[in-house]
Image (cartoon, helix red, strand yellow):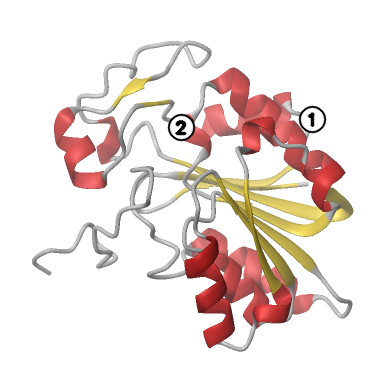
Amino acid sequence: MAGDLNLYGDKRNTTVGNFGVDIAQQRADDLDTLALQRLAASSSPTRALDVGSAGGGQAIRMADIGADVIALDIDDYAGAFSAAAQARGLGDRCAFVRQDIARFDVAGNLGDFDVIVCQRMIHYVRFKTAIGIVENLMRALKPDGRLYLSASGLHSELGDGYAGADSHLDERYTPLADAMVEAHAMHGPVCLYSVADLARLLETAGMRIEQVFTSPFGNIKAVAR
């Protein structure tokens, strides 16, 4: 349809800090759905963390099926998230924390979680920093918890004209081509990933991969423990 951002019909609903489009407020994708299914299958009370939450669309969905949820973002979505939670009668299950995940001890400050969702943000940091973030999140998982992680794909349309395409993963950190910056509101340098790259990230951080796959759009998604 005219005006749609992609084949899913997403609109260009940009995030506060120009960290791309807030997809989670528009729909749940395949990785979001896997996280929701895991929470729904639990017979015990659950806790979930939405990292890089933006407006908290996925956090609200996780609370809606019974989890106690914390939404965490580097930008301030506290007011909007609280209003959305209250509107659905979920205010007692939802909290917002404004922090830079690269500098914030999740387990030490927030405890541990059954599910951690981290979508559409890990590519905004260098690979070395990403390893530290995943280690941080791994420490905040319960023994049987799962991390649901995604990154923008090197072989998606975002890779068209990407100056870092031929760079080694450890050095790959450059802006998208101008046309892609404009289309997707992804400003500043990024590290795009292949399936092998995201697997390497998780394994280097000490996680065990349950699945890693490419979305129809070409982004990379994984479930790990």
Residue 214, compared with residue 194, is above or below; it is below
- The residue at which mark 2 appears reads as 124
Q: Residue furthest front?
A: 79
Viewed as shown, does residue 188 lie left or right of 123? left
Viewed as shown, does residue 209 lie left or right of 139? left
- The residue at which mark 1 appears reads as 206
Amino acid on which disc 2 is placed = Tyr
Q: Position of residue 194 (x, y in %)?
A: 46, 31
In front: 37, or 103?
103
Residue 80, compared with residue 192, is above or below; it is below
Q: Position of residue 191 (x, y in %)?
A: 43, 26
The residue lying at 59 percent from left, 67 percent from top is 59
Q: Residue 13 lies in what quarter of the image?
A: bottom left
Q: Position of residue 110 (x, y in %)?
A: 81, 52
Q: Judge the density around disc 2: few (<14), some (14-19), many (≥20) Cα neighbours within 10 Å.
A: many
Q: Earlier in the sequence, mark 2 or mark 1?
A: 2
Amino acid on which disc 1 is placed = Gly
Instruction: Please count the marks in the image.
Output: 2
The residue lying at 60 percent from left, 37 percent from top is 100
The residue lying at 37 percent from left, 31 percent from top is 154
* Helix, strand or loop at mark 1: loop
In front: 108, or 50?
108
* Helix, strand or loop at mark 2: helix
Q: Evaluate whether residue 194 shows in this view.
A: no
Viewed as shown, does residue 8 lie left or right of 4? right
